[in-house]
């Protein structure tokens, strides 16, 4: 089966791999009673699926503690939490630059340049990368040395994936970074073999994706950028 992804909001996504249903950095769970087509996880929609939930770090726009309660209704649920999040009953805690094996799934982490981890998930013959807050956070007005350290630390982590093929990647393009909004995704796409990348971490400003697609810097890999327009949008991938 091909991969199918749904945009849930900000850095939140669901991915159907065929045998598994993955949820990354789920945050906004309203409107109540809505489903995937509205960017909301409805347990009724996924009750029969083998579900794995990933949370990259403790920030409120990446982690909703409500997911822990899902274990009562989804007996096969697996929850993978970055170890900067308070431990939760039934959850698997994971730190940076680690690798763990679950039934049918291998999970590797990179160290974030902010909080927590990024995930590399090998499952059902596919390799999926979710950056969390691992990004080239170059802020205007920050001390030159801090920005230089950021560039070094970001590249060091992305370079660990050089030589790998990612079937699907989720990478930040934060409008608040202004002219530097695409530095992180650009380095990823030029360093790693990424078949399809879905931009994220743009909050209520999806227009940044149109800017990304029309940016001359992305011309080399434009066809591999999946356009997003609204929450709940689904994208089918080979």
Image (cartoon, grey):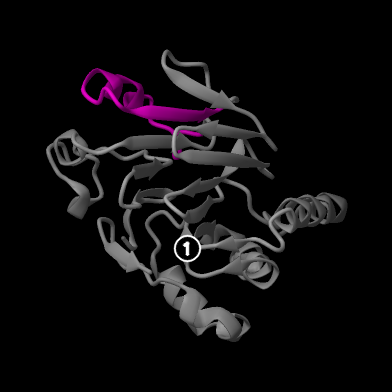
- At horizontal 38% and vertical 72% (from top left) the residue drawn is 227
Residue beneath disc 1: 199
Front-most of residues 103 and 74: 103
Where is residue 74 drawn, in percent x and y?
A: 24, 26
* Quadrant of the drawing holding the N terminus: bottom left
Instruction: Give the quarter of the image for residue 132.
Output: top right
Task: Report if residue 58 lies within the magenta region.
Answer: no
Instruction: Give the quarter of the figure containing the C terminus.
Output: bottom left
Residue name at image x 56 percent, y 50 percent: 131
In the rendering, at what x and y percent does residue 128 appear? 50, 53
SS category of the residue bearing label 1:
strand
How many badges with numbers are in the image? 1
As rendered, which of 126 and 30 lies closer to the eye? 126
Mark 1, residues whose alpha carbon is within 10 Å: few (<14), some, or many (≥20)? many
Residue 196 x/y as whole percent:
48, 69
Q: Residue at x 45, y 16 (%)?
A: 88
47 on left or right of 227: left
Residue nearest the viewer, comparing 166 with 232: 166
The extreme right residue here reads 145
Q: Is residue 52 left or right of residue 132?
A: left
Residue 65, magenta (yes or no): yes
User: In the drawing, does residue 221 fall left or right of residue 226?
Assistant: right
- Can you say whether 168 is above or below 74 in the image? below
Residue sitting at 60 percent across and 84 percent down? 220
Picture quadrant where residue 47 is located: top left
**The magenta segment:** 59-82
Identify the residue at the far top of this view.
89
């Amino acid at each position: 089966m091909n991969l199918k992804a749904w945009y849930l909001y900000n850095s939140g996504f669901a991915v159907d791999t065929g045998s598994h249903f993955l949820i990354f950095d789920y945050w906004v769970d309203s409107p109540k009673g809505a489903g995937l087509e509205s960017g909301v996880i409805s347990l009724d929609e996924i009750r029969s699926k083998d579900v794995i939930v990933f949370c990259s770090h403790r920030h409120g726009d990446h982690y909703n503690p409500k997911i822990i309660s899902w274990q009562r209704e989804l007996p096969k649920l697996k929850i993978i939490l970055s170890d900067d999040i308070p431990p939760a009953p039934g959850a698997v805690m994971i730190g940076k630059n680690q690798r763990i094996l679950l039934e049918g799934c291998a999970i590797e982490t990179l160290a974030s340049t902010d909080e927590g981890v990024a995930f590399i998930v090998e499952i059902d013959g596919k390799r999926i990368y979710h950056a969390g807050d691992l990004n080239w956070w170059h802020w205007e007005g920050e001390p030159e040395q801090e920005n230089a350290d950021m560039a070094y630390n970001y590249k060091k982590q992305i370079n660990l994936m050089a030589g790998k093929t990612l079937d699907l990647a989720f990478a930040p393009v934060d409008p608040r970074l202004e002219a530097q909004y695409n530095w992180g995704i650009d380095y990823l796409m030029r360093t790693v073999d990424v078949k399809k990348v879905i931009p994220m971490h743009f909050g209520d400003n999806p227009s940044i994706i149109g800017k990304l697609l029309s940016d001359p810097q992305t011309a080399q890999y434009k066809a591999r950028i999946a356009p997003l327009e609204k929450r709940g949008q689904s994208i089918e991938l080979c």
